[in-house]
Amino acid sequence: MPLLRLENLTVTAAGENGVKTILEDVHFEIPALSVTALVGGSGSGKTTAGLAVLGLLPPSLRVHSGQVIFDREDLMAATPQRMREIRGKEISMVFQEPLSAFNPVFSIGRQIEEVLEVHTPLNRRQRQQRVLELLDAVGLPDPKRTSENYPHQLSGGMRQRAMIAQAIAAGPKLIIADEPTSSLDVTLQAQIIELFKKLQSELKLSILLITHDLGMVEHLADHIIVMTQGRIAEQGLTREVLMNPGHAYTKELMEALG
Ligand SMILES: Nc1ncnc2c1ncn2[C@@H]1O[C@H](COP(=O)(O)OP(=O)(O)O)[C@@H](O)[C@H]1O
Ligand SMILES: [Mg+2]
């Protein structure tokens, strides 16, 4: 039983020039306790696929047909209230730019605590303790001080760690990480990759990693899904696909890697 299964998901956009297909028959599975990479060029539909899973498509996009099954539950049939429960608790998302994901007027600790308040039975004192543990778990020094900082007071790398702390706060089964390192320099990228690796095995969760970075894919992902123009070009075990790429786009990516 896969943790997540997209079945022939088709997403369309209604625009002035008629209806445009953004995702066409997207079909894949994510096993429990795995890391799956979703790769593809800019505009290929990777972010849209992630947002569709979470029920967060912008108003101009809609699911035309297909299904999203998460942990045996049909998310297309879930109520808005159920989706709010699932987001943050069962599935959480890490974005490329943590500065825009955090609210600038609340401290980091307050914003992580809010996730615990919504999704766990912990009382205030327990939540505050848990925030410090979470900040420590993602490798942030001086958790007490960091929790009191506002988002703009942290460096880019620290902010990304704080967002990962928020993403794991309520013990999700799946993290969707959308280009989580592309705003960081190379050294920091490597550190964040290591952090994901550690958290995945320690916390026994699955990660859907959206990325352009084949180095990161090789390091982290058991499975790879390659998208072009809203469709799946190929998918399979990472080492098999990368050793013997079947699609022109995958070959191009490999060549770019050198
Ligand atoms: N709100 C929207 N309305 C109309 N088209 C959109 C919207 N969001 C994204 N698109 C289009 O959907 C396609 C896929 O976008 P996206 O999922 O962001 O790709 P990726 O994350 O792979 O770069 C692009 O052609 C983009 O222009
Ligand atoms: Mg994107």
Image: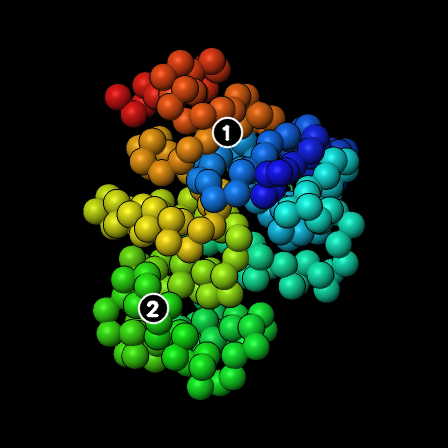
Q: Which residue is mark 1?
A: 225
Q: Point out which mark residue 135 bears.
A: 2
Please say if 228 is above or below 129. Answer: above
* Number of residues whose C-alpha sits closer than 10 Å to that of mark 1, classed few (under 14), some (14–19) or many (20 or more): many
* Amino acid under disc 1: Ile
Instruction: Please report the residue visible at 41 percent of the width from the left and 75 percent of the height from the top.
Output: 130
Q: Point out which mark residue 183 bears.
A: none
Residue 16 placement, left or right of 70: right
Residue 39 placement, left or right of 220: right
Return the x and y of residue 71 as percentages of the image width and height. Answer: 64, 47
> Gap between marks 1 and 2, in whole Å?
31 Å
Instruction: Please report the residue visible at 60 percent of the width from the left and 32 percent of the height from the top.
Output: 28
Please say if 82 is above or below 62. Answer: below
- Asked if the beta carbon under badge 1 is closer than 8 A to the nearest atom of ligand 1, the reply is no
The kind of secondary structure element at disc 1 is strand
- N-terminal of the pair, mark 1 or mark 2, is 2
Instruction: Please report the residue visible at 69 percent of the width from the left and 33 percent of the height from the top.
Output: 7
- Asked if the beta carbon under badge 2 is closer than 8 A to the nearest atom of ligand 2, the reply is no
Q: Label 2 near label 1: C-beta < 8 Å? A: no
Instruction: Please report the residue visible at 54 percent of the width from the left and 38 percent of the height from the top.
Output: 31
